[in-house]
Image: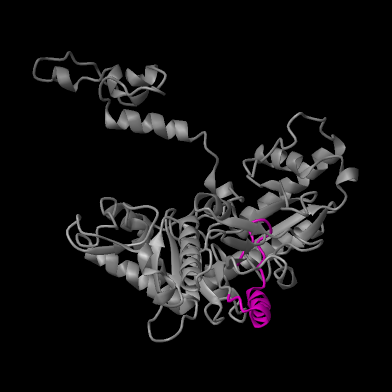
Amino acid sequence: MALHEMKEATAATAPARDERIDDATDVFASPLSGEVLPKYRMPADHSPTEVVYSLLHNELLLDGNAAQNLATFCTTWSDDGARRLMDECIDKNMIDKDEYPQTAEIESRCVNILADLWNAPPGGAATGCSTTGSSEAAMLGGLALKWRWRARRKAEGKPADRPNLVCGPVQICWEKFARYFDVELRQIPLEPGATGLRPHQLAPYVDENTIGVVAILGVTYTCDYEPVADLAAALDRIQAESGWDVPIHVDAASGGFVAPFLHPDVVWDFRLPRVASVNTSGHKYGLAPLGVGWIVWRTADLLPEELVFTVDYLGGNMPTFALNFSRPGGEIIAQYYLFLRLGRGGYRRVHQACADTAAYLAREIQGMGPFTLLYDGQGGLPAVCYTLTDPAASGFTLYDLSDRLRMRGWQVPSYPLPPDRAETVVQRVLIRHGVTLDQIALLVGDLRRAVDHLTKAPPTAVADPQPGFHH
């Protein structure tokens, strides 16, 4: 082994004072890291970038692991190409179409691609736009329904002060729409054994003040499709009997990017003349990063002109229809990137892989013992929904099971079905792009161990009726 002698530093070899290592050069020895971070007031002065980044990075480790979040419909995995494009567009405001005309062009291309995917009438008559997500898109669709109904009522010399919207078990955005925009929401209760709206239920709820019927392609609670074509046929019969021409808006937040690839024979879209508009989430099964949704109307005349504003203070006259104004353009670019990179074949393979994984999980759940499947992941979204076969005899609840699974990092939601099936508590596992078969196999192992533990050591009663995941 070589021996080395220590040499005395000279003025020539000693580092300059500002190059010497001191405590402040280590992130976790910096002044800011020795303090509790400000929660309610801005600090008095600035701090180094790397210090603030590292402290916040560590704090965010307290969040759940997105890869184990089996509750969310939203994209949790993106490839490097999407990430690079998002980074390059971080400074682009998509609302400023005069300054960023190519981003506006790409948004238009996406609308056209979706109109074609959803079988809009030929000739380019469809119109649409991007939004921050499917909730905003749904509200825009609802506003168009209300404005068209009101214009028709006024033209007929009839009152237009009591609009209503008919639906089944919808996502909360429709309840928000009804409250914010003064529309009565007629939410039809679930029938025994049903998980969504059924055609024969419509007649008692639809009347001359109905602005539209919302059909769900991918029910939030159970992930199956409502029968849009059958709902349209029921409305045809109602019109023949009463003269009420009631349009359908399809909330295809997730199914709009699944059905065209996995279930092309399911007729739910603009092939049905009664379907006036469709919304979807680009950041769900559209695979784009969070922050983009879409709405398309089958023809431009179905979007009332009064709802479209023109602004000129960003450099040019620009039409806009949105609840939000300034928005980043990166998500739109990423959506178009995915359309180009995957194509129809790629989307089909991605979603088929998810559906195959859901089928595997359904088989495992079915054979596990205490569960009854409500939805096996086939014919709708790639997901599985199940309940306890005999809750009273199990000795534990699905909320207990959710709580137990969270000890291993899994986020699996438990919640009651909507009225009139609120006595049924279910669990739902969503299979998204990036959720692999191996990952679900690990979940199955943890699920078996959790059931075994809860069966052998039933939990004691707790004050909170939902000790696990709050949906």
Q: In the picture, which quadrant includes the C terminus?
A: top right
The residue positioned farthest toward the front in the image shown: 157
Q: Measured along the vertical axis of the image, is residue 72 above or below residue 400? A: below
- In this rendered view, identify the residue nearer to me: 81 or 267: 267
Residue 241 colored magenta?
Answer: yes
Q: Measured along the vertical axis of the image, is residue 59 above or below residue 424? A: above
- In this rendered view, identify the residue nearer to me: 309 or 126: 309
In percent of width and height, residue 440 lies at 65, 55
In percent of width and height, residue 78 lies at 44, 56
- In this rendered view, identify the residue nearer to me: 3 or 173: 173
In percent of width and height, residue 93 lies at 27, 54
- In this rendered view, identify the residue nearer to me: 387 or 250: 250
Q: Measured along the vertical axis of the image, is residue 397 above or below residue 218? A: above
Quarter-of-image position of residue 378: bottom right
In percent of width and height, residue 258 lies at 56, 69
Residue 62 visible? The answer is: yes
Specify whether 287 is left or right of 312.
right
Q: In the picture, which quadrant includes the N terminus?
A: top left
The residue positioned farthest toward the right in the image shown: 393
The residue positioned farthest toward the left in the image shown: 12
The residue positioned farthest toward the bottom in the image shown: 122
Residue 286 visible? The answer is: no
Number of numbered discs visible in the structure rendering:
0
Stretch in magenta: 216-245
Quarter-of-image position of residue 16: top left
Q: Measured along the vertical axis of the image, is residue 258 above or below residue 457? A: below
Specify whether 298 is left or right of 435.
left
Residue 93 colored magenta?
Answer: no
